[in-house]
Amino acid sequence: MKTAGFRFKSLTLFARAAALLLIGAAAHAATTVEVSNVSQLANAVSNANNAGGNYTILVNDGTYNLSDTLYVNAPNVTIAGKSGARDKVIIQGTAMAENAQVGNIIRVAASGFKLDAVTLQKAGWHTIQIAGETNADGPVITNCVLRDAYEQLFKVSQDLANPNVISDNGRIENCLFEYSAGVGPEFYIGGVDAHGVKGWVIRNNTFKNIASPNTSVAEFAIHIWDLPSANNTVERNTIINCDRGIAFGLDGRGSSNGIIRNNFIYHANNGAPFADTGIALMESPGTQVYNNTVYFENNFPWTIEYRFAKTTGAVITNNLTNKPIVTRDSATATLSNNVVTAAKSYFKNVATGDLHLASAVSGVVDAGKAISGLTDDIDGQARPTSGIDIGADELVSAGPAPNPPTNVVVK
């Protein structure tokens, strides 16, 4: 048994190492280097830039205290925690403060950047900035922790004087965004703040405590805005105790034809002074909002809003909430099969933000509408083609107990 366990572990480690070697590959083979201290990390990024990219940097477990931003200016550069344990590879600035020596932890100005299995924290501006104004396309951020930045945790920037040069086709997946103190340092904070992006997917992430301590409401946990922003998908995320949840667009700065689906959004009655809406469409024509679950225990009066006259052709369907869905400032949308009277008893554990259905609630289970593109739920479990449940969770019956195995000898 010992030998089999060792063999399995060895094969697992081998598979991990092989996967990391492939992460940074582009049209031709990447250079791969391994680093164990902050000087080596900074030098590796510099060497990647000087080599013209196609570079994979494997970071060993440890804490890497930066004295300056890591500037990625060449294409197809990967930074990945070698062990795959994101909590064991910490790359950090000097402070979460307005006058911090390190503004961004990482700034990316080229396409094909990948970040995997690391923690970024203590930034004066952002843990990562993707410079859309340099046409930095296709960034992929997976299995990371992004925490404690004095401004938005993740930023995609845009030059409004040259708005058609943007970041396309990015992906953020399986990451944790949080303020570890339970509240942010100021109001000008957010989770993902993306300007002018197209074709991005933000999936399977958790956002916690993106909340303002004073002055005004914080930005959204996920905010996509500024034209020509379009065709972005936000799905299967869990958002807990953030001032605001998910938004596409802003007044005069829209985002069109996106999808917001299969998300959990929860806010406790925790005294947060600026708690606001869960989902907002603001100048977001053609956007679809479906099969989300939003539950507020605070005093904010609604959970989903669609706003401004340029929000037209929106579809809001199969959402499960405990407070109303409202229209504001002449917005129009088609609403169907939404339940806005959810009770706490519908869910497994509201206090922890676990909004999975606890039982087969009448009027919720099998009461949804079939929607093109709706194939799974917040857990990635397949949805049926008919009898769709309302909300982000498709209730799966435990079914009968399996038959015991017949090929086991008990001694």
Image: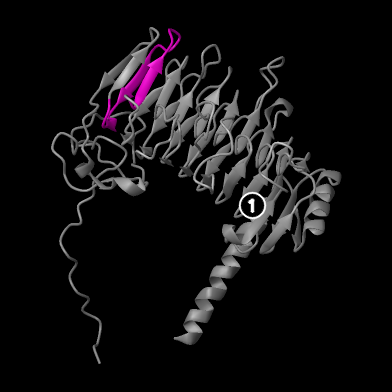
Residue identified by numbered label 1:
23
Q: As displayed, is residue 175 above or below residue 103? A: below
> Looking at the image, can residue 29 be seen?
no
Most extreme residue toward the left is 362
At 53% across and 80% down in the image, what residue appears? 6
Magenta stretch bounds? 302-323
In this image, 148 relative to 402: left or right?
right
Q: Is residue 1 left or right of residue 148?
A: left
Quadrant in which the C terminus appears: bottom left
How far across and how far down the image is residue 399, in percent? 17, 57
In the rendered image, which quarter is residue 398 located in?
Answer: bottom left
State the image coordinates of residue 233 (x, y, percent, origin top left): 47, 31
Please name the residue shown 32% across and 23% down the image.
Answer: 316
Considering only vertical position in the picture, is 24 above or below 228? below
Q: Is residue 372 visible?
A: yes
Q: Amino acid at mark 1?
A: Ile
* x and y, in percent, of residue 205 in the image: 48, 44
Question: Number of labelled discs?
Answer: 1
The N terminus - image quarter: bottom left
Front one among 272 and 22: 272
Residue farthest to the right?
Answer: 50
- Residue occupying the point 28% across, 19% down: 335
Q: Who's the residue at 65% across and 42% down the image?
A: 127
**Seen in the image, is 109 located left or right of residue 314?**
right
Looking at this view, is 171 or 23 the one in front?
Answer: 171
Magenta-drawn stretch contains 240: no
- Where residue 350 appears, x then y in whole percent? 30, 45
Q: Residues within 10 Å of mark 1 (few under 14, many from 20)?
A: many
Q: Is residue 408 above or below residue 318?
A: below
The secondary structure type at the circle numbered 1 is helix
Q: How is the image coloured?
A: one colour
